[in-house]
Amino acid sequence: MKTLSKSRFVSGMQCHKKVWFDFYRKDLKTPVDEAQQRIFDLGHKIGELAWRKFPDGKDATPEDYSDFIPSIANTKQWISEGVPTIYEATFSARNVFCMLDILHKHQDEYWAIEVKNSTNVKDYHLTDAAFQYFVMAESGFIPDRFFLMHINNQYVKDGEITSDIFHLEDITEKVLETQPWVIENLDAILQALELQDEPQITIGRQCGSPFTCDYQHHCWSHIPENSVFELSRIGKKSWDLYEQNILSINDIPEDYPLSNFQQLQFRGSKFGEKHIDVVSIQNFVDKWHFPLYFFDFETIFPAIPVLDGTRPYEQVPFQYSLHRLDDQGNLDHFEFLANPASFQDPNESPLKNLIYEMKNHFGSNGSIIAYNMAFEKRILVSLKEKFPEEKKFLEDLIERMVDLMVVFQKNWYYDPAMGKSYSIKAVLPALIPELSYQDLEVSNGDMASNLFHASVENGSFVTKNLKNNLSEYCKLDTYAMVVLYHFLQNLSVK
């Protein structure tokens, strides 16, 4: 009989085939990429920070993760000795085991505490907790209360990070209610693991919920490129088509009910059709007022705030690029990139510095063009709240903004090469293939954000050329909008 950990129980709850692969075909698992590793690293960092809320505990973390016997023994001994707090308290019974983030004795109660880096309780967190409670109870130890300790998104950094960054949510009743469910599903998972061959489970919504499965590439190997799952916002209709053995977009019946954008995708894929509504594009662009300011922010959004006055996961701007185009065709470029050290310097304010430079670079009139301007607007609104003395200036910027994305969002222009996306990263290579991010050292927003965040924690740019690389990336974002604007103008005069 196999032994199930919490993570493998969660795998089994997502799909029996997934947990079967975890035991017997780990060779099929995709390697951990940088994004996943950052999530793991963040989890460790959040866990260690959570210990500060319950300090001076004993740590049962195993020295060798292939041998949990010492951790189990230490946990049992420390509980018998009345140790107030145990980190990574480890329990085992029959064919299940778990490691609890924090076991804390509060007066006469034992609190089981699981730490998460989200800002609220999610369904799969309850799955975690219910399984852990079951293991603890089976091992002969029943906690009095069970808590989910998650990030408090109302916490505002002011100096050193304090334990107030966490919120304790009592989930005891929900955990108790789900114990019969745990037993029922545990038995089913264990039975699946007794199979000699992989369970015969077809692909379905479970492949992406609550997380994208590590084995999806294997189970989905029969799905062709340009499949029905690539249709924009297709939802359950994709499974309706799949069940009819319609896998390719090109094989969808022409009378099948699709949205307007899905129809554009279908006809673009099958017949190579483009769709261009020149009149709507011209009417939209003609309303813009010179000089035109093509504008883009780059931000970090750390779970643990790095700047005083900011909250967990708040989008904090550290850079912008601005191209200014006048009615004579003259193009100028302006930019701002914060010094990473200024985020840790109490005598510096990178956000004030940013606003100061914006006041130098923006004139008092002219349209401000962004791509997906809702993002830039949110940043400006946040700055307005932090610096009410700059309210008039920032509100003026907000009122002057227009969104270049509207042209593609409203399907006034569609090229099959865009696929299912109207993001600038999809539109640019489709319409202006000579402009590419591929040769840049920093080639996307996530990379820019992660590298600058690392630089803040380091106190300086983490690589020699990072400052220049960040500048080149952000500059291309706004230059791309300029080129798209000229492209659309040329359409209008044809």
Image (cartoon, rainbow, N blue to C red):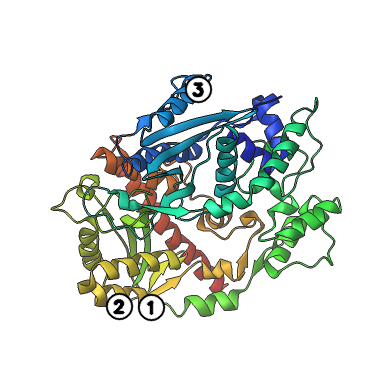
Numbered disc in front, either 1 or 3: 3
Label 1 secondary element: loop
- Which residue in the structure is indicated by mark 2? 365
Q: Amino acid at mark 3?
A: Tyr
Gap in Å between the C-alphas at discs 3 and 2?
63 Å
SS for tag 2? Answer: loop
CA–CA distance in space, label 1 to label 2 = 8 Å
First in sequence: mark 3 vs mark 2: 3
In this view, the residue in front, 25 or 334, is: 25
Q: Position of residue 336 (x, y in %)?
A: 27, 55
121 or 395: nearer the viewer: 121
Return the mark for residue 65: 3
Q: Amino acid at mark 2?
A: Asn
Q: Which mark is residue 52?
A: none
Label 3: how many Cα within 10 Å (few below 14, some 14–19, many 20+):
few
Image coordinates for residue 278, horizontal then vertical, percent: 59, 74
Q: Nearer the viewer, residue 231 or 176?
A: 176
Residue at 39% x, 65% y: name it.
376
Can you tell which quarter of the image residue 219 is in?
Answer: top right
Earlier residue among tags 1 and 2: 1
Q: Which residue is mark 1?
A: 289
